[in-house]
Amino acid sequence: MIIGNGKIVTNDPQNPFIENGGVLIKENIIEEVGEFESLKKKYPEEKVINVKQKLIMPGMINTHSHIYSAYARGMSVSKPTDNFFHVLENQWWSLDRKLTLEDCKLNAYTTYIESIRNGVTTLFDHHSSPNAARGSLFAIAEAAKDLGIRTSLCYEVSDRDGKDITKDEIQENIEFIKAYNSAEEDMVKGLFGLHASFTLSDETLYQVKEAMEGIHAGYHVHVAEGIEDQYDSLKKYGRRVVERLFDFGLLGNQTIAVHCVHANQRELEIIKETDTSVVHNPMSNMNNAVGCPPVVSMVTQGIRVGLGTDAYTNDMFESMKVANILQSHHLCDPTVGFGETKRLQLENNPAICKNYFQKEVGVLKKGAYADIITVDYNSYTPLNGENYFGHILFGLTGRMVNDTIINGKFVMKDREILPVDEEKIFAQSTERAAKIWPYM
């Protein structure tokens, strides 16, 4: 199959932009990227999909989200949400305790569908449903497989719901990692999820390390999102959050440290030295009023910082826009933000994925997975290899995505979700959310 007849942003430094290009897909892999007419002549037997001058790009990557929050859109909360801890306790922890396995799967369907609609082809999720911990990651994975989206899943272990539930959460991570990380298919992978230092005792972390003996997988953990996380760690353990995680051997190139809003320079040095990935979630940080992480400094120091949404949105184009202006606003410097945002989304998110998936994603080149989107974008200024990111950042939104191809298959074509009945799923979600909201 050849997808072509549009401008191509490849995200491949060796061949970054093609004026009128095409992508040859063989099964689930990109076989060749080149001029559209040349590809048609070279491979006359191939089926041709003419995108009619739409922009062709790699699928978007979201390296941190929370599927369990799907029912929250439009929801009111009766208890205070006037600080970060109250937001957690009275909104998110109150919601996640009400979820059943059926809710987990339904939340996965709606989140994945909206992500696909916004051009997201790979999503890293950090899940919580303490009263339905066992089987929850497997339920989410079933929805992912039904839809055909690439995903990394984990369960956020914490002490907040008692020792028995903590044990269930640990076991869910272990069983999921064992089931999926050694599988030949490369669509669903597992990490070991940890909530945050302030909800994890030393006893629990020792249990985690014991359970993970002999298992090759990294961790996905919130790090110093709120300043309270640092206060708690210093008071209880005499160590800052990153230092404590390092002491337990939880950092490394397989680990994702989310937020790092209140990480100091020594902590950043540890993150760099251990080759740990960081994920920035600008809209969530601003919404929770926890502060602005030192993204520019992290990037300058060579830390691999990716970009996520923390479930604030399922549109990575929105997340990029805010990532750009947050840094320039926070540092009172209009020259920063743009280049860093490009690196986070187009360089570092694909680099993070390399640690978990067998072939490259986030790039259109020979040998990469065929995760491709087309965008209905008619530019009124020149679009070329020198300025394409300016168009991506300031001109595109997720709702412009027309087609989403994942692993060589159309999962959305002409804005229609193909694998499942979207209308039926959304109706089920609306009905179920209405039953949960009165208890919030």
Image (spheres, grey):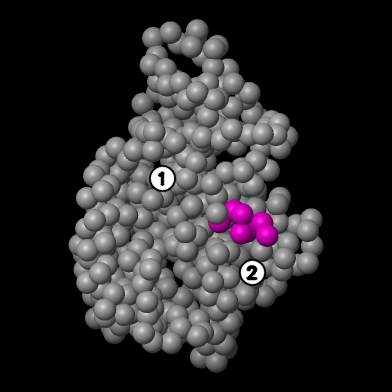
Task: Decide: few, some or many residues near mark 1? Use Cα within 10 Å; few <14, some 14-19, many ≥20.
Answer: many
Element under label 2?
Answer: loop
Q: Which residue is mark 2?
A: 293
Would you say residue 321 sits in the magenta stretch?
yes
The N terminus - image quarter: top left
Whether residue 77 is situated above or below residue 74 in the rendered picture: below
Q: How many marks?
A: 2
Residue 432 lies in what quarter of the image?
bottom left
Q: Nearer the viewer, residue 128 or 284?
A: 284
Residue at 36 percent across and 26 percent down: it is: 27
Mark number, residue 117: 1
* Quarter occupied by residue 228: bottom right
Give the CA separation, mark 2 to mark 1: 29 Å
Label 2: how many Cα within 10 Å (few below 14, some 14–19, many 20+): many
* Mark 1 residue element: helix
Dot 2 or dot 1, earlier in sequence: 1
On screen, residue 26 versus residue 168, left or right, reads right
Q: Which residues are magenta?
A: 319-325
Is residue 4 highlighted in magenta? no
